[in-house]
Image (cartoon, rainbow, N blue to C red):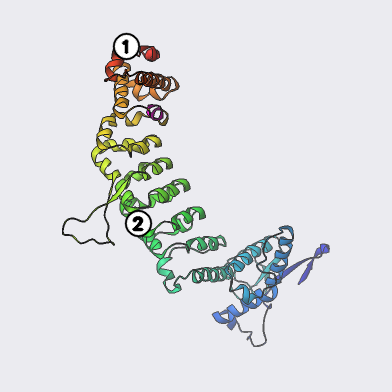
């Protein structure tokens, strides 16, 4: 220990003699034998570094009331069995070195001392670099986290081969990682061709969303549905990933959408597709039921087949419309198909009081009288919405009087509603 200047600030200087025991030979053998190096590392940490970190933690907690101490009052042995304590110690070590509370010296082959300014230079006390010492405790913390979660450390390399635990923040992500079912890790590993580090090195909240996903019904379905594009899930926003996992939590719906998932940008559209019905297929006559291999028919796949390329219109449509289409039958969808790209949620809500064929009749009338531009562009403007609202209100009044026209399109063509259509005639 030395005093630094007149402010009596105390610092620790780690030298080549620090922690040296009588039984250690001076010929440099301790620099070559891993066991001896680790013993000297622990001794240096226990006798000289840990007390500084404990003092620093105590000062910090004095200003952060309510925080639980992780190092104060514990021995190094106790700390080495607590991953959270190891994480706290590594944070405080960085702080202590940044603030100059701990300095490290290296010794050259000629016996000259020099201050260590890089974490990749071997230091005198144990011939480890600072980076090596941190890596030792990071690895120890990671093993504690995995063991606590019931993971098999023997399989760690196969399952987490490219998951890097190289900075202190890695331990927090490792805790999120162990929330994953091993099957989930396997599916991610397959889908990403073994390159899972971008996932496990990403946002912790995003990891939590993936961790909650069912591996068979969700991740496997997603892997098969997207194929070589599976890696695109890493570009999804947190909100979009959450919508997919919560509303398309079954492989049948995911497989039905397939690569169409990659064309959707609005999370609300995903939630809307999630409301579409799905039914379990009954075994064919003479076939035994297999509870492990249930088959499902989704309305998504039915509509997709019926609409052909027009199904893509729904991928950018108003979420309210997508949800409404899921409640229609195929005949109704066919009648409304041409108008799907142009219906906003507001227009759809205004049309609600009308029977389905009445809605189609009114839209056909708009197309016939006001032209394509009104339906495809002007109908969702403020003036266009008012035209729709006035016409629907007029039709409701006629229905109340018992004079609802049988063919709304013909009625519009006859000029009865021109007072409402005037701005666009």
Q: Which residue is mark 1?
A: 415
* Most foreground residue, 79 or 424: 424
The residue most toward the bottom is: 23
Q: Position of residue 51 (x, y in %)?
A: 71, 71
Q: Position of residue 413 (x, y in %)?
A: 29, 14
The residue most toward the left is: 286
Q: Secondary structure at mark 2?
A: helix
Q: Residue at x 28, y 32 (%)?
A: 337
Note whether 282 is above or below 107 in the view shown.
Answer: above
Left or right: residue 379 versus residue 8 is left
Question: Residue 184: in sight, yes or no?
Answer: yes
Where on the picture, by quarter, is residue 9? Answer: bottom right
Q: Earlier in the sequence, mark 1 or mark 2?
A: 2
Q: Secondary structure at mark 1?
A: loop
Q: Position of residue 213 (x, y in %)?
A: 41, 56
Q: Residue at x 61, y 84 (%)?
A: 27
Question: Residue 109: in sight, yes or no?
Answer: no
Alpha carbon distance from label 1 to label 2: 56 Å
Q: Which residue is mark 2?
A: 217
Note whether 245 is above or below 131 in the view shown.
Answer: above
* Most foreground residue, 388 or 52: 388
Note whether 158 is above or below 250 in the view shown.
Answer: below
């Amino acid at each position: 220990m030395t005093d630094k200047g007149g402010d009596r600030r105390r610092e620790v200087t780690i030298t080549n003699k620090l922690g040296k025991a009588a039984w250690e030979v001076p010929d440099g053998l301790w620099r070559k034998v891993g066991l001896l190096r680790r013993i000297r590392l622990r001794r240096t940490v226990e006798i000289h570094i840990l007390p500084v970190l404990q003092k620093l933690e105590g000062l910090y907690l004095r200003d952060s009331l309510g925080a639980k101490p992780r190092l104060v009052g514990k021995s190094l042995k106790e700390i080495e069995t607590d991953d959270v304590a190891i994480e706290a110690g590594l944070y405080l070590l960085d702080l202590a070195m940044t603030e100059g509370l701990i300095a490290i010296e290296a010794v050259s082959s000629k016996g000259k001392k020099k201050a260590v300014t890089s974490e990749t230079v071997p230091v005198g006390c144990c011939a480890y670099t600072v980076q090596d010492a941190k890596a030792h405790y990071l690895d120890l913390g990671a093993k504690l986290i995995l063991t606590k979660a019931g993971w098999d450390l023997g399989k760690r390399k196969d399952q987490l081969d490219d998951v890097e635990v190289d900075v202190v923040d890695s331990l927090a992500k490792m805790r999120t990682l162990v929330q994953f079912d091993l099957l989930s890790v396997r599916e991610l590993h397959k889908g990403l061709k073994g390159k899972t580090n971008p996932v496990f090195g990403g946002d912790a909240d995003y990891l939590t969303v993936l961790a909650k996903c069912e591996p068979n019904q969700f991740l496997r379905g997603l892997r098969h549905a997207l194929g070589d594009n599976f890696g695109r899930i890493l570009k999804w926003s947190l909100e979009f990933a959450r919508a997919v996992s919560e509303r398309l939590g079954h492989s049948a719906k995911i497989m039905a959408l397939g690569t169409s998932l990659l064309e959707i940008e609005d999370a609300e559209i995903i939630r809307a597709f999630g409301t579409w019905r799905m039914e379990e297929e009954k075994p064919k006559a003479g076939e035994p039921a297999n509870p492990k291999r249930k088959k499902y028919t989704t309305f998504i796949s039915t509509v997709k087949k019926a609409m052909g390329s027009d199904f893509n219109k729904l991928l950018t449509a108003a979420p309210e419309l997508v949800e409404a289409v899921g409640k229609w039958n195929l005949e109704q969808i066919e009648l409304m198909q041409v108008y799907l790209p142009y219906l906003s949620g507001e227009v759809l809500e205004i049309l609600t009081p009308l029977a389905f064929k009445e809605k189609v009749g009114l839209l056909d009338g708009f197309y016939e009288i006001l032209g394509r531009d009104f339906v495809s562009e002007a109908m969702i403007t403020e003036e266009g919405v008012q035209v729709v609202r006035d016409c629907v209100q007029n039709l409701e009044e006629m229905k109340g009087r018992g004079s609802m026209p049988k063919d709304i399109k013909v009625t519009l063509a006859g000029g009865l509603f021109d007072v409402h259509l005037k701005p666009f005639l």
